[in-house]
Image (cartoon, rainbow, N blue to C red):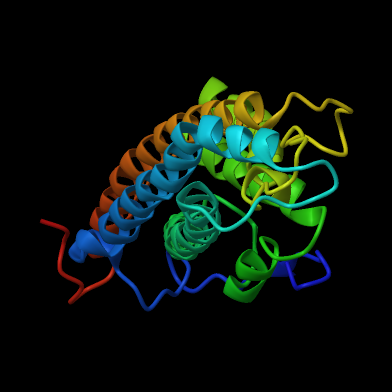
Amino acid sequence: MDVTGDAVARPLVGDGYVDDLPFARQPRALLRPAAVALTVGAVSLLPVAVRAGNAAGLQAAWDAAPPAHDPGPSPVLTVEQVAAWLGPATFLLAGVFACIWLVRVQRIVVRADLVDVFHPDSALWIMWAVPLANLVLPARRLARFDRVLHGTRHASWAVLAWTVCWVPNASPALWQARLTRDDVSPLVPFVDWQPGIVASAWWRLGVGVVGFALWAAVVVRLTRAARSVDADTASRLARSTPGLPAAS
């Protein structure tokens, strides 16, 4: 698929697709980005947790401020601003490694001849940055890889549940700073609800934790299946192609 969403056919060569990354002979090529993506993703929850713990003080600072006036500089406002900056930064970094992992999963799927078309690496990167498309396309790719790697007709419950949770997790309202008297739900504009600074901060943390747990389940599930499939592919190609070493 190119950046517009059109599928691109990839030619077959011999007994499988040509690929320049024999992952079965480089075990860490898939494990490393998966591990880093999950580690950085877990770290991205720390600023969200800090904001939840800081929310009561932030609410008190607003309540103490005169009407129509912003509260003066204070530690709670500084913590909110710093944590609100660190949250998106670490979340974006985790997404970079997640995309590297997804690209390598696709190469394994293509190398194993499990799909008739492939999506260029650039398309897998761009789909995360296109508004609205980033709410749908990542889930579709993950569901497809889950089906072909496990030989099932439907994606697993983990992928389907993560798809539902991905929408609020991808919402800017989950990450942006809340320095107003009335905070809003991270689901805006989908839900017209203003729970206040404290309730919204803990809601953001809950959504983030659930979303990360589901994402970790998806990454572990697909990584295990992809490594198994690629080892089988390497063995098959070694038997059919003279001079190609078998996977250890």
Query: Which residue is at a point 73% across and 52% down the rendered structure image?
Result: 70
Q: Is residue 246 left or right of residue 36?
A: left
Q: Position of residue 217 (x, y in %)?
A: 41, 31
Q: Is residue 185 left or right of residue 109?
A: right
Query: Which residue is at a point 16% across and 58% down the rendered structure image?
Result: 247
Query: Which residue is at a point 77% across and 73% down the rendered structure image?
Result: 3
Q: In this view of the protein, which residue sits in the foreground, 117 or 209?
A: 209
When the figure is inspected, residue 28 is found, relative to residue 47, above or below; the finding is below
Q: Is residue 151 left or right of residue 50?
A: right
When the figure is inspected, residue 211 is found, relative to residue 174, above or below; the finding is above
Image quadrant where one finds the C terminus: bottom left
Q: In this view of the protein, which residue sits in the foreground, 106 or 113?
A: 106
Question: In this figure, what is the number of numbered marks?
Answer: 0
Q: Position of residue 220 (x, y in %)?
A: 35, 38
Image quadrant where one finds the N terminus: bottom right
When the figure is inspected, residue 62 is found, relative to residue 195, above or below; the finding is below
Query: Which residue is at a point 21% across and 61% down the rendered structure image?
Result: 28
Q: Position of residue 123 (x, y in %)?
A: 67, 70
Seen from this angle, which residue lies furthest left? 248
